[in-house]
Amino acid sequence: MIKRDGKTFSSRTLDDSEFINELKKKSFEKLEEYINTKTNEEALEELADLLEIIHVLAVYHGASIEKVEEIRSKKAKERGALEKKSF
C-alpha cells in the first residue's frame, strides 16, 4: 500500500520480544481508535484490526483463534457474559 501510494519505506524482521511489544502497542492504538469512532462502520473497521492482532497473538502463544474463543465461551458461562449488559 505504501509503495502504491508512491511513498518509500524501510522494514526489518523483528525478534519475538520486539514483535510482541509492537503488537501490544498497536493493540492500544487500535483500541483508542475504536473508542474514538463515531459510526458503526468505523467501529467495525477498528474491531477488525483488533481481531487481526488477537489472531496473531493467539498463534504466537501457541494457540488458535478457535482456542481463544473456546476459553472466552467457557469464561462467559462460568462468570456471565458482558453482552447481557450486567455490570
Image: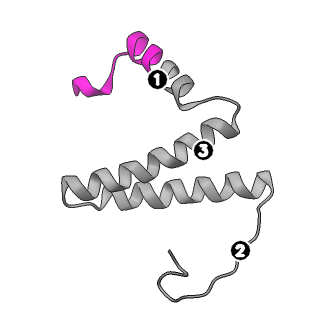
Identify residue type, mark 1.
Arg
Which is nearer the eye, 35 or 40?
A: 40
- State the colouring used for the structure image: one colour
Please give left or right for residue 66 compared with residue 81 in the image. right
Whichever of callouts 1 and 3 sits on the residue coming sooner in the sequence is: 3
Residue 37 vs 66, above or below: the answer is below
* Left/right of residue 21 with respect to residue 30 in the rendered view: right
Residue at disc 3, secondary structure: helix
Q: Residue at x 52, y 20 (%)?
A: 71
Q: Main secondary structure of the magenta part?
A: helix
Image point (54%, 48%), residue name: 53
Amino acid carrying mark 2 in the image: Ser
Q: Nearer the viewer, mark 1 or mark 3?
A: 3
Which numbered disc, 1 or 2, marks the residue closer to the eye? 2
> Which residues are drawn in magenta?
72-87
Indicate the position of residue 11 as horizontal and vertical percent values. 71, 74
Q: CA distance from mark 3 to mark 2?
A: 19 Å
> In this figure, which residue is indicated by the disc labeled 1?
72
- 35 or 43, which is in the foreground? 43
Residue depicted at 75% across the width and 58% down the height: 18
Residue at the spot of label 2: 11
Does dot 2 land on a helix, a strand or a loop? loop
Q: Earlier in the sequence, mark 3 or mark 2?
A: 2
- Residue 73 in magenta? yes
Q: Position of residue 28 (x, y in %)?
A: 50, 56
Give the crowd class for mark 3: few <14, some 14-19, many >=20 residues within 10 Å. some
Q: How many marks?
A: 3
What residue does disc 3 label?
56
Where in the figure is residue 30, as x and y percent of width and height?
A: 44, 58
Q: Amino acid at mark 3?
A: Val
